[in-house]
Amino acid sequence: MRRQPMQTYQKAAQAAEDMEEKAHSEAVQEEAPVTPPEAEAPVEPAGEGCAPLSETEAEARFQAELEDMRLRAAAEMENFKKRLTREHQEQMRYAAEKVLGDLLPTLDNLDLALQYGSKNEVCKDMLQGVAMTRKLLLDAVARHGLALVGEEGEEFSPEIHEAVGFAAREDLASGVVAQVLQRGYKLGERLLRPAKVMVNQ
């Protein structure tokens, strides 16, 4: 009869201990952070999961990059050579521009001598020599690319003509050169001096 209270007390103590352990276990589960599904299986960035290149593949890629660099350098060198050649040709073509420009006043004076000397019979023989000298000079400068610009009767063009006045000639159409007051000159495609003209109305 005396053992029954002791057994009841032990059972109650065991039950209390079990309930305490159960409560403690539930408290730990509640405190533990919940891991989201995304964190459990992180997605690796593209390329990181790829297998590393083998030695042969790395060498092939390196050689391809070297070949690309070589081709680019060769193309740049070829363009540089072409640019130098073009600049040299341009320089040689217009190297005499300053000298020929300095000769223009001489050609102008020869033109004036022929224009005003032709009105005097006394100067007839001398004018032949002036005309021959002018022709020889024009032939010499023409070999270096100098050409005359401006002729009576041609269509007026502001690119090669400089209008200094207007004229009224019935034998010419309107808008053409009626009179050339001063010759113009071109060196190749470059205009050294426009021709000063009168435009017909």
Image (tube, rainbow, N blue to C red):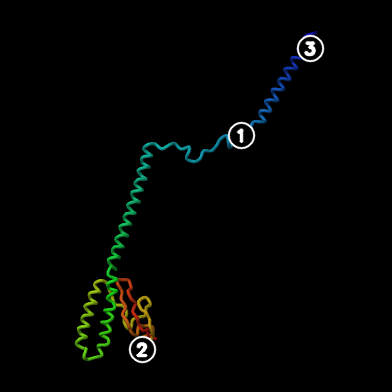
The residue indicated by pointer 1 is 35
In the rendered image, which quarter is residue 90 located in? Answer: bottom left
Q: Is residue 114 above or below residue 7?
A: below
Q: In the figure, is residue 83 to the left or right of 139? A: right
Q: Quadrant of the N terminus?
A: top right
Q: Of residues 157 and 130, which is closer to you in this image?
A: 130
Tag 1 near tag 3, CB within 8 Å: no
In the rendered image, which quarter is residue 129 located in? Answer: bottom left
> How many angstroms separate mark 2 from mark 3 (CA)?
151 Å
> How many angstroms separate mark 1 from mark 3 (CA)?
49 Å
Tag 2 near tag 3, CB within 8 Å: no
The amino acid type found where label 1 is placed reads Thr
Tag 1 near tag 2, CB within 8 Å: no
Choose the circle earlier in sequence order: 1 or 2: 1
Helix, strand or loop for disc 1: loop
The residue indicated by pointer 3 is 5
The residue indicated by pointer 2 is 169
Pinpoint residue 170: horizontal percent, then vertical percent.
Answer: 36, 89
Pinpoint residue 83: horizontal percent, then vertical percent.
Answer: 32, 60
The residue most toward the right is 1
The amino acid type found where label 3 is placed reads Pro
Pinpoint residue 69: horizontal percent, then vertical percent.
Answer: 35, 48
The amino acid type found where label 2 is placed reads Arg
Q: Residue at x 36, y 78 (%)?
A: 161
Choose the circle earlier in sequence order: 2 or 3: 3
Q: Residue at x 71, y 20 (%)?
A: 18
Would you call the spot at circle 3 few (<14 residues within 10 Å), some (14-19), or many (20 or more)?
few
Choose the circle earlier in sequence order: 1 or 3: 3
